[in-house]
Image (cartoon, helix red, strand yellow):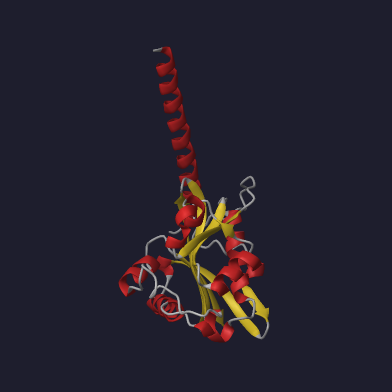
Amino acid sequence: MGKKSSKGKEKKLKRKEEMAKVNAAQAVIDVANEVKDPLASLTAFKTFKRNGLDLCLECKRLQDMSTEDINWAFDLTKHNMQLLSCNHFDSSENYSYENSSWGWNDKRKRDEMTEDKARYLIAREESGKAVAFSHFRFDLEEGDEVLYCYEIQVESETRGKGLGKFLMLILEMIAHRAQMKKIMLTVFKENERAQNFFIKIMKFQADETSPGIWDPMNSEDYFYDILSKPLVRKAATNNDMGSRDTAA
């Protein structure tokens, strides 16, 4: 009976350690979610002036977004993703939500983009016209605290000018300051342009939760990859995440 008792104690201790890890990760996420504007202290990244663009950037929680901005973000996402043409992504096939087993669904996508924890990093022209955005959240994935990038969308006239890379670099800065372990995102396998951007340019790699990693024998059954980029952790300081400015 001694061995069984010992094994039972080990399992109980392991469960306790796992729960403590999850609770610690959730605490980090809770702190990050309290911050109203994680871009506030990143003043050097509030403008983008290169390649003929002169843009200002802002970061907003969903509750601070105007209906006009929410509708614009949804419409741009739908336009770009509902049917990805070969002209957009240099692919011999049209492949997108519409072709996938997920299928494009207006209500499902709008619900996703308007969940309470959604945050938006938006680039605007001086006139106020929005030209690009990223929808992201601080969340718990497989017990790890992560910044999950749900969308990064750019208007056609501002593509190919480094704006998408700039937005991703800002997300990395925000994730670092929020003490996240990594940035994660989902990308279609056949979206060659996006695959190239995230893997070759932004240095993402297949996450351990990606179907091709945990189910390699059936990887062809999945039409998407989950990519991630680990972040170097550092000790938190009073200056991290700006001034911890929370909502009133």
Compared across the picture, whether 169 is left or right of 211 comes to right
31 relative to 82, above or below: above
Of residues 189 and 194, the one nearer the viewer is 189
The x and y percentages for residue 137 are: 47, 60
Q: How many marks?
A: 0
**Among all residues in the image, which is located at the extreme left?**
107
The x and y percentages for residue 188 are: 48, 68
**Among all residues in the image, which is located at the extreme right?**
50
Can residue 18 be seen?
Answer: yes
The x and y percentages for residue 246 are: 48, 57
The x and y percentages for residue 228 are: 56, 57
Which residue is located at x 56 percent, y 54 percent? Answer: 182
205 relative to 24, above or below: below
Q: Where is the C terminus found, in terms of image quarters?
A: bottom left
Which residue is located at x 40 percent, y 73 percent? Answer: 97
Q: Where is the N terminus found, in terms of image quarters?
A: top left
Can residue 46 be seen?
Answer: no
Which residue is located at x 52 percent, y 63 percent? Answer: 37
Of residues 135 and 229, the one nearer the viewer is 229
183 relative to 65, above or below: above
Which residue is located at x 62 percent, y 60 percent? Answer: 173
**Among all residues in the image, which is located at the extreme top?**
2
